Amino acid sequence: MEDPKLRGIYAAIVTPVDPDGEINLERWTRHARWLLRKGCHGLGVFGTTGETQAFSVAERQAALEGFLASGLPADHVILGVGCCARADTVALIRHGLSLGITRMLALPPFFYKNVPEEGLFRAFAEIVETVSDPRLELLLYHFPQVTGVPIPAPVIARLLARYPGTLKGIKDSSGDLAHTLDLVRSFPGLAVFAGADQHLLAVLEAGGAGTISAAANLNCAASRAVFDAFERGDRARAQALMAPVAAVREALQRRPLIPAIKHVIAHGRNDPIWRTVRPPLVELDPAEGERLLAELDALGFVYDPDLYAVAAA
């Protein structure tokens, strides 16, 4: 990869909200600091796991300003910016750039389905050219099971040929390891991140960048241990460490993923506000939450709120 810094373990950070649905900045920033202390190389802010599409552009911009004003480092952030309207995506990118964030993760416009490749190419090209800022480092966000709009390889190739200094990476949340590995092979100059924690080691071994993942909100230390073992060349250790990473992710994704993560945080912090989600999501059923906690306990997973409290001090 051209930029060795654009790799590692990034938590697709959840967004805590109050019962009225407003973003709770204090909880959000404390959780972010905890994640960095636990070993995250950086944070994916306002991605899918952050319930981003439930927040307006203005809400996201105001919260981001508070997030960075708390002292969190802009150069550790990959900012989710993809919207259906070009003007909204451009506004989010320009705002992020004004705050010192250069790395932006963009979904395709996702309302219209079955669009031609030419339309997807134009959508991303218009964003890059409208922003027209050499600081922009764009990552494409491939998540077809949610958006209904895949980003095919020919579109990526055209964008890379047109904007080689701007297009920096891809997050593949398809959950299809073969597809992720094909992206790594096809685009060796791009930082390819898996969205699936289970694929971390396979992606690293193929030359990929790492993960930007939801389960890292809870288990980033385990993922970081895999990454570090791989970096040391200790493949046997990395393989052994992958088992708990995969097991925790699989326990979480057997439930609605975002409510499940928030339920675990709420339990670990003894803070029921953390369970709150914005509609159309709903909180995890309490009985299902207890089953999840029992499964995680059986796996030996420990959520350590004491370290959380130290990180916030």
Image (tube, grey):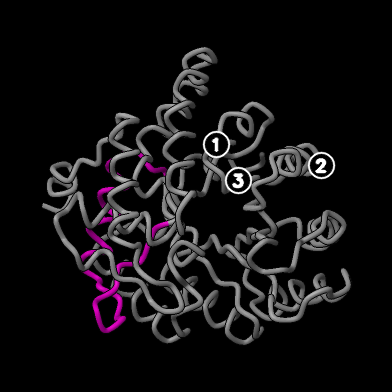
Q: Quadrant of residue 200?
A: top right
Mark 1 residue type = Gln
Q: Quadrant of residue 178?
A: top right
Q: How many marks?
A: 3
Nearer-N-terminus badge (3/2): 2
Q: What's the distance in space between the residues labelled 3 and 2, CA to CA?
A: 14 Å
Nearer-N-terminus badge (1/2): 2
Place of residue 259 in the rendered image (x, y in percent of width and height, measured from the top left): 38, 61
Q: Is residue 208 above or below residue 171?
A: above
Mark 3 residue type = Phe
Does residue 169 appear in this view?
no
Label 2 SS: helix
Label 3 SS: strand
63 left or right of 117 in image: left
Residue on which disc 3 sits: 193
Place of residue 172 in the rendered image (x, y in percent of width and height, measured from the top left): 65, 51
Tell me if mark 1 has few (under 14), some (14-19) or many (20+) residues whose alpha carbon lies within 10 angstroms of its own.
many
Residues at discs 1 and 2 in contact (Cβ within 8 Å): no
Q: Quadrant of residue 39?
A: top left
Place of residue 31 in the rendered image (x, y in percent of width and height, measured from the top left): 26, 56
Reply yes or no: does residue 17 show up in magenta.
yes
Which region of the structure is painted magenta? Answer: 13-41
70 left or right of 168 in image: left
Q: Is residue 198 above or below residue 85?
A: above
Residue on which disc 1 sits: 198
Residue on which disc 2 sits: 186
Mark 2 residue type = Ser
Mark 1 or mark 3: which is in front?
1
Mark 1 or mark 2: which is in front?
1
